[in-house]
Image (cartoon, helix red, strand yellow):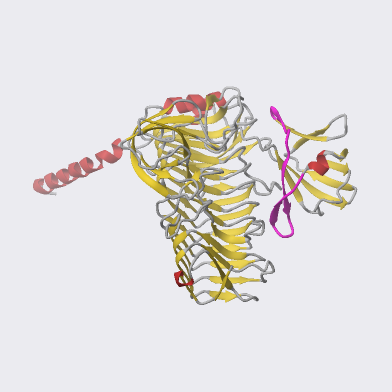
Amino acid sequence: MTKARLEINIMRLLALLILMLPVFTMAQEVVRADAFGVRSNSFENASGAIRKAIDFCRGKSNATLLLPGGRIDVWPEGSVRKELYISNATENDTLSKEKNIAFDLADMHDLTIDGNNTLVVLHGKMVSFVLTGCRNVQLKNIRFDYERPTMSEMTLVKVSPNAIEAAIHPDTWFYIDESQRINWYGEGWKSRSYHTILLDTGSGRMHYSSFQPFAGSRAVRSGPLAVRFEGDFSRGNFAAGNVLTTRDPYRDNVGAFINRCANVRLEGITMNYMHGLGIVSQFSEDISLVKVRVAPPEGSGRVISAFADCFHFSGCRGRILLDSCLTSGSHDDPVNVHGTHLKIISISKGNEVTVRFMHHQTYGFEAYFAGDSIALTDPATLLAKGFAVVKTAKLVNRREMVLTLDKDLAGMMVGDCLENLTWTPELTVRNSRFEKTNTRGLLVTTRRKVVIENNVFYRTGMHAILIADDASSWYESGPVQDVIIRNNLFEGCGYNSDPQHTVIAISPENHKLVADRFVHRNITITGNRFNLVDVSVITARSVDGLQFTGNIISGDGNTTGKPSFSLTACKKVEIIGNDFRVGWRPEIQLENMKADQLKADLQVVKK
């Protein structure tokens, strides 16, 4: 090799090293949790060791905390304990709002927690993980479960009008007291109320039920996990093979909490059970859930995975992505995306207002910040009366905030509500499956773009998709303005949605209609397949711009006697080019709207 060529090669090598320098400087530091005493399959309390490992990662740039694999157990003793006020999950009483947290990731930045397929078993009532004030944090390849889920399950083996023999699931702890009544208990808790949902294993459907006939009957243990109940079961709709699932409905916890964070990604996470409201994201931005499963452990025989919702987003912004997720066995809605209307209770100086949280389970956190845009909303019509920007915001007590607006709003009245427009997210839900729930599939109320595509909604008890908006009950805001629902399969949904019995419901709770003004707009439903079982397809109210085209509708008949489509006070509706493979004549019912606002190739009737 000549000297000149050698010099050229050296220069090329130096240039390559310079180009690679940022890669080396950004290399992740791997922190092994077992170095801090987190030992797999030891059945020891790992709470303190987890805290030490997380604390060691604080302040580090681009670190990965690697869990040891196998099983680790976490007890409240030694865990982080914090007071948390969480949307839709804070009971209105004087009891402590402190939670025990397995993984407390407060103020962490540029961190990955790689679970290495670790099973984290929680004891007592604990939150799996809490992210507060975090940025660029990823959790992956972790499975969470409870030693004793707070859901009790039993299978009915033999049923008669005066006795039922039941097999109690091994993960359900119970005892029979001196009065021969059955009682559910767990690690540090005992059920005092019995919210009950029944799974019909033959049909795969879930229905509301009652535990009262069992709680009031004489219970006799006939085996280690077998109980004979003697009482009056003549009025109950029970059958052999049914699974009765029961919980105390008091919301004192959540499965996980993401609060005031940005750029959070959960991937390959499995929640075998969540006590409380599920994974709640609150006033956070840019959240991705990829291959997140909420389902009982395979082969466990359990049917319920979530005490209430699975994925709950309140007051978020940026982009929310759910991709390739599964929910199976929730006692409430798999997905809920919404904001929160706060009611004006006093006005002073024209542009200073005091607003109040109105629902008893949502309060205690800041819902507005300086610089946020707001809409003044009439709670009766759900229409905007004006817009402003927040100059100052202060949480003055757990229920109330005082806001200073940048201008006076004409027509503002005590009793009106405010919606935070800044904290509204884009939403994409795709390639996912939602099954085994008694309630709805997706609840969506956000002004920004929504895409729901390539999903399977399998026998959701109520509407597979509900677009609501209200300022009088749950106070969950707001209107939608750009929604695409395409290429989904709706299989046997809506059987519990009495009296509407529809697969998709666009049902804002506006109690007063205003001519030529609408709550929702621009909703497209196309390329989907609806397999109906005694339900209608859609009900829609107060929508400007609704398209239902290119869908396939099949099923075994509609015996409800209700129209396939019910439209109330809508505008610019198209229901054309759909393939009806059904045994009844589809028709569209109109109420409070003119026929020229509908373009359709089906029979139209007036209510």
Residue 329 in view of the camera: yes
* Residue at the image point whose x is 70% and y is 46% from the top: 302
Report the quarter where the C terminus lies.
Answer: bottom right
The image quarter containing residue 41 is: top right
Which sits in the foreground, 541 or 25?
A: 541
Q: Position of residue 36 (x, y in %)?
A: 50, 25
**Residue 494, relative to residue 37: is it above or below?**
below
Residue 183 position, x and y percent, is 79, 34
Q: Position of residue 550 (x, y in %)?
A: 48, 72
Residue 21 falls left or right of residue 178:
left
In front here: 568 or 527?
A: 568
> In front: 205, or 187?
205
Percent x, y of residue 367: 44, 35
Which range of residues does the magenta coloring cover? 187-210
**Residue 205 inside the magenta-drawn segment:** yes
Q: Is residue 127 magenta?
A: no
Answer with the quarter of the image where residue 374 lies. Answer: top left
Q: Residue furthest left?
A: 4
473 horizontally vs 376: left or right: right
Q: Residue at x 70, y 29 (%)?
A: 189
Residue at image point 81% right, 45% down: 167
Front-most of residues 452 and 294: 452
Count of numbered tags: 0
The answer to whether any part of residue 286 appears in the image is no
